[in-house]
Amino acid sequence: MDPDPHSDISAVSALEEPARRRLYDYVRAHHDPISRDEAAEALGMARPTAAFHLDKLADEGLLTVEFARRSGRSGPGAGRPSKLYRRSDRQVVVQLPERSYELAGQLLAQAIDDSERTGEPPRTILGRRARDLGRAVGTEAGPSDADLLATLERCGYEPRDEGRDIVLANCPFHTLAKAHTDMVCGMNLELIEGLIDGTGCAGRAARLAPADGYCCVRIETTPAAPDR
């Protein structure tokens, strides 16, 4: 696995596009490599559209590319080899709601590794990595409250619009937070602050506000923000 979390973030973002995800799932379901024509016909897409998204998935390392002549002919007159795609061996965190604890484990492990190498406190590194992750995911969304809510949902939260504020009815890291409250809540805060920063949602700020039955983070409307 690539130790750089930003490459995983880019791959996750690539799979957020519905057509691209359908193509990835189609190729993944087949043992033999798939051509552009096969994928386009199977999914009812235009060939150029399928080709574009397949190449994007290959660029992200989610698919591997090979060339072969499907006719079995060779030599002059056999035509150009077809570009074929198959699922790569790369493993990524492809869906934050389902893989939240794996995500937290990766961030924690990377923070410890970086700390041993640099001497910087692990919590400082953990917070920075969580914020960077949130920011990268957030940049794929728009700047409205609706975009922010949708992004939070994709990340495993259950956001509720409560007047001028947004509360989170769950914590994706609940079990881990019970055992390591300060560390995990701090990571969670940095992650959500990064999401807000990445979306560019003006007039929103996150703060720690633990309450029974809710995530420890509350997203407030800043004083300078207009009424929503």
Image (cartoon, rainbow, N blue to C red):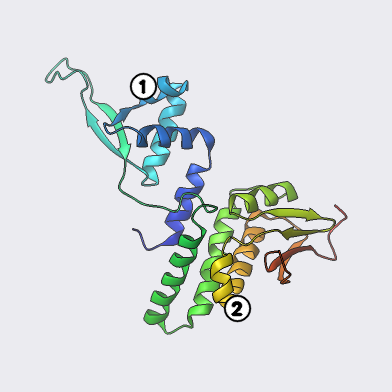
Q: Please report contact status of discs 1 and 2: CB closer than 8 Å, yes or no.
A: no
Q: Local crowd at mark 1 within 10 Å, few (<14), some, or many (≥20)?
A: some
Q: Secondary structure at mark 1?
A: helix
- Pointer 2 residue: 182
View extreme (right): residue? 227
Q: Is residue 165 above or below residue 72?
A: below
Image quarter of the N terminus: bottom left
Q: Amino acid at mark 1?
A: Asp
Residue 151: % across, % down = 63, 50
Distance, label 1 to label 2, CA atoms, is 53 Å
Residue 27: % across, % down = 36, 33
Residue at the (36%, 41%) spot, across then down: 58
Q: Quadrant of residue 191?
A: bottom right
Residue 146: % across, % down = 73, 47
Q: Is residue 207 above or below residue 61?
A: below
- Pointer 1 residue: 37
In the rendered structure, the answer to whether residue 71 lies left or right of residue 85 reads left
Pick the residue in front: 224 or 17: 17
In the rendered structure, the answer to whether residue 167 lies left or right of residue 175 reads right
Count of marks, rendered view: 2
Residue at the (30%, 48%) spot, across then down: 89
Q: Amino acid at mark 2?
A: Asp
Q: Earlier in the sequence, mark 1 or mark 2?
A: 1
Residue at the (69%, 67%) spot, across then down: 217
View extreme (top): residue? 77
Pick the residue in front: 210 or 63: 210
Residue at the (52%, 78%) spot, across then down: 123
In this rendering, which labeled residue sits more in front, label 1 or label 2? 2
Q: Quadrant of residue 203?
A: bottom right
Q: Local crowd at mark 2 within 10 Å, few (<14), some, or many (≥20)?
A: few
Q: Secondary structure at mark 2?
A: helix
Q: Is residue 38 above or below residue 93?
A: above
